[in-house]
Amino acid sequence: MSVEPVTAKDYEARMCSPQLQLTKTEIEEISEMLLYEELSKARIRDLEEGVREQRARGSARAARRWTRVARWATRRAERYEHQS
């Protein structure tokens, strides 16, 4: 039985998995995929911002509506107080 000396480089070559080597086409496909992912995220952020703005306008609209209703109720109450 003979024993061969093993260097660190030999050990790493045997034990480590080979590094992934990508072709130019694969790199371009991955880059394109990441680009589309970023575009999707940007669109989602834009939609969420639009929804927030719409909700803010909606609550402002509701506040104006309730202000008008309160004003109408006050005038109506004053009118009935003067009649009594």
Image (cartoon, rainbow, N blue to C red):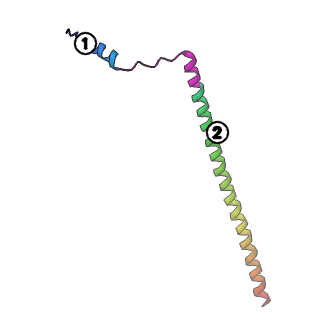
Q: Check residue 19 for magenta coloring.
A: yes
Q: Residue furthest front?
A: 1
In this view, 19 is above or below 80 = above
Which residue is at a point 56% across and 20% down the rendered structure image?
26
Identified by mark 1, the residue type is Val
Q: Nearer the viewer, residue 77 or 40?
A: 40
Secondary-structure class at tag 1: loop
At label 1, counting other C-alpha atoms closer than 10 Å, the crowd grade (few under 14, some 14-19, many 20 or more) is few
Residue 56 rendering spot, x and y as whole percentages: 65, 55
Residue that numbered label 1 is attached to: 6
Residue 2 rendering spot, x and y as whole percentages: 20, 8
Secondary-structure class at tag 2: helix
Which residue is at a point 78% across and 83% down the rendered structure image?
79
Quadrant in which the C terminus is drawn: bottom right
Residue 40 rendering spot, x and y as whole percentages: 62, 36
Query: In which quarter of the view is residue 24 placed?
Result: top right
Which residue is at a point 56% across and 24% down the rendered structure image?
30
In this view, 27 is above or below 55 = above
Identified by mark 2, the residue type is Arg
Q: Residue furthest right?
A: 83
Q: Check residue 26 for magenta coloring.
A: yes
Which residue is at a point 57% across and 24% down the rendered structure image?
31
Measured in 3D between alpha carbons, the distance from the residue under mark 2 to the one under mark 1, in whole angstroms, is: 55 Å
Between disc 2 and disc 1, the foreground one is 1
Query: Sequence-wise, which precedes: disc 2 or disc 1?
Result: 1
Q: Where are the magenta residues, as a range?
A: 16-31
Query: In which quarter of the view is residue 65 placed?
Result: bottom right
Residue that numbered label 2 is attached to: 43
> Is 68 displayed left or right of 55 in the figure?
right
CB under 8 Å between callouts 2 and 1? no
> Is 70 displayed left or right of 1 in the figure?
right
Q: Nearer the viewer, residue 15 or 28?
A: 15
